[in-house]
């Protein structure tokens, strides 16, 4: 079970709590986690990734295990701590402002 | 019960005000979609409890919402606005070509005859239509064929912000795009033409009378006279009596003819309202006095409406979608400011009062009237 942490605005849209749990079939990568998240919560489509290009929105960040994965390739496996559910995969609104 | 419902979009949520036709006592909702930029909310003329809303965020992009109970509850609807074909490029601020890219929905215009049909004006500029209550959106792409590569963004972005539907002819639609101009279709969107003849932009365009490129801020029409259009251009208040084919300036004695919104009285097709702003450089009212100007002659002769409005130290702006009129017997006029005030005049502009003082920056104001 993959644990995904959502920022406040996306929790409201998803109608979820701070953290959601997802079953991800096959390899656990950023792409498969995001696909599973959007399948489970269709109201989040377009809010994390562009609808057409599937590129990360510029002010969204992906963190896990104290690492910023935002600029990592989407198809490499996520850390074992995330795969096993010991650590969450965090979707974060980037700091923006003063 | 007769009364009004006011739909206010702000940069940090939407608010709904309700009152009886006296428009003195108001019920004000809790923030709806708190923290989100609510560019525009508008109800269906066919079913007033059907309201469409554009919800956006610099972080999380565009979300669309729909209510079927007058704004008590909302459902997320489709937020996929895909251009119908490769949109190519448009002119960027520095004169280079820039890829066309969807950013947000600025304006929603529900159909006059069908509650499930609604138009959306978006940035980068395009017109979308839904015929299933927002479950899917399809672009009317021919609009971009009208010299789209020459359009360029204004300071607020290259947005399609105004959609005027003809009550007598559902195939006729007028739209306006920042720093591109006004355009009209007479065949339901299959073909479009620029309708900017008579506009002059001496300081904004190298060719002041170019066919496209004019910074049109807002257009309004009275439903009883759909061929008469009133326009607030960047500078100049304009009027057309042939559905936009030709425009004449009617700025007359205004203290400044720069501004954003323009509205037509609900019952008097020659009575129009603007809020003069000092200039594009300052974006606040002349002399620090917040004055709505009313013309009862379709332009040229204007009177200042000041009772109840601050007449000193006022430096707010009124954005293009932030003025509306109701259709009560004594027609009401409403506007919201970048300082977070929403004002109402229940007597066509003679007297004003604030409904609220301290909202976030107001982006849009619409009003629904219940007989």
Image (cartoon, grey):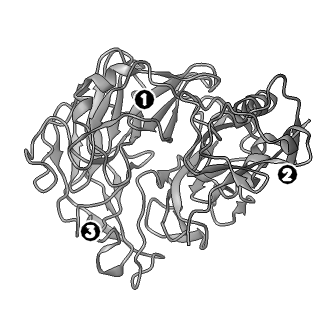
The foreground one among B114 and B319 is B319
- On whether disc 1 and disc 2 are found on a single subunit, the reply is no
Residue at 53% x, 46% y is B327
* One can see residue B192 in this view: yes
Which residue is label 1 attached to? B127
Residue B40, compared with residue B359, is above or below; it is: above
Q: Chain of mark 2?
A: A
The foreground one among B210 and B330 is B210
Using the numbered discs, state the Cα–Cα distance from disc 2 to disc 3 in whole angstroms: 44 Å
The answer to whether B165 appears left or right of B132 in the picture is: left
Total labels drawn: 3
Mark closest to the chain's N terminus, 1 or 3: 1
Which residue is label 3 attached to? B281
Q: Are marks 1 and 3 in contact (CB under 8 Å)?
A: no
- Where does residue B113 sit, x and y in percent of width and height? 54, 23
Based on the displayed image, in which of its 4 quarters is residue B64 positioned? Answer: top right
The answer to whether B221 appears left or right of B326 in the picture is: left
* Quadrant where the C terminus of chain B is found in the figure: top right
Q: Which label lies toward us, 2 or 3? A: 2
Using the numbered discs, state the Cα–Cα distance from disc 1 to disc 2 in whole angstroms: 36 Å
Mark identifier at residue A18: 2
Q: Which label lies toward us, 1 or 2? A: 2
- Where does residue A98 sit, x and y in percent of width and height? 56, 73
């Amino acid at each position: 079970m993959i644990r995904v942490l959502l920022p406040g605005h996306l929790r409201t849209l998803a109608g979820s709590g701070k953290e959601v749990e997802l079953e991800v079939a096959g390899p656990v990568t950023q792409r498969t986690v995001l696909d599973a998240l959007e399948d489970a919560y269709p109201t989040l489509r377009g809010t994390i990734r562009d609808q057409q290009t599937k590129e990360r929105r510029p002010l969204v960040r992906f963190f896990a295990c104290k690492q910023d994965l935002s600029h990592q390739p989407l198809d490499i496996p996520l850390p074992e701590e995330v795969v096993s559910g010991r650590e969450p995969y965090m979707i974060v609104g980037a700091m923006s402002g003063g | 019960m007769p009364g009004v419902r006011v739909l206010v979009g702000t940069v940090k949520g939407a608010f709904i005000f309700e009152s009886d036709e006296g428009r003195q006592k108001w019920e004000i909702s809790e923030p709806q979609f708190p923290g989100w930029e609510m560019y525009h909310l508008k109800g269906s003329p066919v079913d007033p409890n059907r309201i469409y809303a554009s919800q956006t965020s610099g972080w999380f992009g565009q979300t669309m919402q729909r209510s079927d109970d007058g704004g008590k509850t909302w459902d997320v609807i489709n937020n996929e606005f895909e251009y119908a074909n490769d949109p190519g490029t448009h002119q960027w601020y520095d004169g280079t070509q820039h890829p066309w890219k969807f950013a947000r929905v600025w304006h929603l215009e529900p159909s006059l005859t069908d509650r499930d049909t609604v138009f959306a004006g978006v940035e980068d500029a395009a017109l979308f239509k839904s015929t299933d209550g927002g479950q899917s959106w399809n672009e009317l792409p021919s609009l971009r064929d009208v010299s789209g590569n020459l359009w360029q963004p204004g300071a607020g972005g290259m947005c399609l912000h105004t959609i005027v539907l003809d009550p007598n002819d559902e195939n006729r639609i007028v739209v306006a795009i920042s720093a591109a101009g006004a355009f009209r279709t007479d065949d339901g969107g299959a073909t479009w033409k620029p309708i900017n003849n008579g506009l002059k932009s001496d300081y904004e365009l190298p060719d002041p009378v170019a066919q496209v490129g004019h910074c049109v801020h807002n257009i309004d029409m009275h439903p009883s006279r759909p061929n008469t259009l009133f326009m607030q251009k960047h500078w100049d208040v304009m009027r057309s009596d042939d559905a936009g084919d030709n425009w004449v300036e009617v700025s007359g004695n205004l203290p400044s003819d720069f501004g954003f919104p323009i509205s037509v009285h609900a019952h008097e097709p020659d009575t129009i309202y603007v809020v003069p702003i000092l200039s594009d450089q300052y974006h606040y009212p002349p002399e620090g006095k917040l004055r709505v100007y009313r013309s009862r002659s379709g332009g040229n002769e204007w009177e200042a409406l000041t009772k109840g409005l601050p007449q000193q130290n006022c430096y707010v702006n009124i954005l293009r979608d932030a003025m509306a009129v109701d259709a009560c017997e004594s027609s009401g006029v409403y506007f919201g400011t970048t300082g977070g005030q929403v004002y109402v005049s229940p007597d066509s502009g003679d007297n004003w009062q604030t409904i609220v003082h301290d909202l976030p920056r107001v982006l849009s104001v619409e009003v629904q009237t219940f007989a």
